[in-house]
Amino acid sequence: MSVLIFAELDEGKLRKSSQEAIFYGAKVAEQLGTSATAIVIGQADESELATAGRFGATNVLHASDAKLNEPNGMAYATVVAAAAQQEGTKVIVLAKSSLADAMAARLVGKLRAGLAANVVELPDLSNGFRVKRSIYTGKAFAFTDLTADVKILAIKKNTITVEESDATASVDTFSPALNDSDFGIAVKSTDKATGDVLLPEADFVVSAGRGLKGPENWGIVEGLAKALHAATACSKPVSDLDWRPHSEHVGQTGLKISPNLYIACGISGAIQHLAGVNSSKVIVVINKDPEAPFFKSADYGIVGDVFDVLPRLTKAVQAL
Ligand code: FAD
């Protein structure tokens, strides 16, 4: 029996959130006195897969069937369930993402498992298997006792602090039987988000709202993002107006992110926007209206005009 971690790839590299999941899974394995195995699906070099060892996995199962190149929650769930059955796994760990969401419910069905989502700490095993979860978009915590034989933990991104060692993991090919019914959903294409830094994974995010007045003004947002090596994001109206791609929209109806630093420029701070960003570790708000609701959630606030503040902030960061 080992703890099994689903580790997601981004262009052949382990995602930061996968590193967090592996580290977390390895700690759970330690608690249970067992080892941690990662399951990785898609094309990746063996040397990259072996780096899973740095985060605590002893072994990697690699499913690289060409049919699995596109992220397909249905087929991926079959692969992970087969790996869990092969390994006799009782605990599966994955990092919350849209792919993980698409897989998790299917895994529950296939393995008759119990699922806890948005897990933020190691389980408490002193009296059963109790996990702490973030609920109500980060406003509260719930403690959930998982009693099913197989337990699935979907961890919240950027809540686990990873420590690395110089260990490497062994890598084995994994080729479970797949049939047509596993591809009842066909992924026709995937759109890669724009920008150098992937928004869901970003440590720093510069986000802007309707206060920017129009898409032609985004140069100042991108300028600060580039200087900070940050991803760009936006409020819903901005993506609705096609000023920015939908992949940048954060909030209740968009991406939920928890970067170390979130800089909100010309965004009012409506509750639906906050729902996607209020787990950020540090929030900086730039708004010309001192009464803007966002200031109530800010760690640092700048009352000022974005067209004045942003270029000056960018210059200051570049000078560091
Ligand atoms: P505005 O509300 O127009 O605010 C613009 C802000 O910019 C103001 O505070 C203004 O003072 C400031 N400003 C203007 N000019 C300047 C300047 N020159 N310098 C500095 N500051 C300036 N919204 C989301 O973002 N994400 C969601 O997921 C989401 N989901 C929703 C779901 C539902 C069901 C509903 C009903 C709404 C949802 N909304 C969502 C919309 C949300 O309620 C707000 O309308 C939206 O977040 C406002 O966007 P904004 O702050 O960019 O624009």
Image (cartoon, helix red, strand yellow):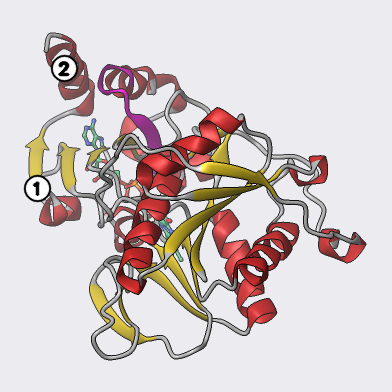
**Residue 311: image location, x then y, percent:** 21, 16
Instruction: Note whether residue 140 is visible.
Output: yes
- Relative to 225, is 74 above or below? below
Say whether residue 62 is left or right of residue 69.
Answer: left
In the structure shown, which secondary structural element does the residue marked by tag 1 occupy? loop
Start and end of the magenta stretch? 226-234
Please identify the quadrant where the C terminus is shown. Answer: top left
Question: Which residue ends up furthest to the right in the rendered image?
Answer: 180
Q: Residue at x 36, y 39 (%)?
A: 210
Of 7 and 217, nearer the camera is 7
**Amino acid type, residue under disc 2 in the picture:** Val
- The residue under label 1 is 299
**Amino acid type, residue under disc 1 in the picture:** Asp
**Residue 208: image location, x then y, percent:** 33, 36
Say whether residue 283 is left or right of residue 16.
Answer: left
**Residue 122: image location, x then y, percent:** 28, 68
First along the sequence among labels 2 and 1: 1
Q: Residue at x 67, y 67 (%)?
A: 86
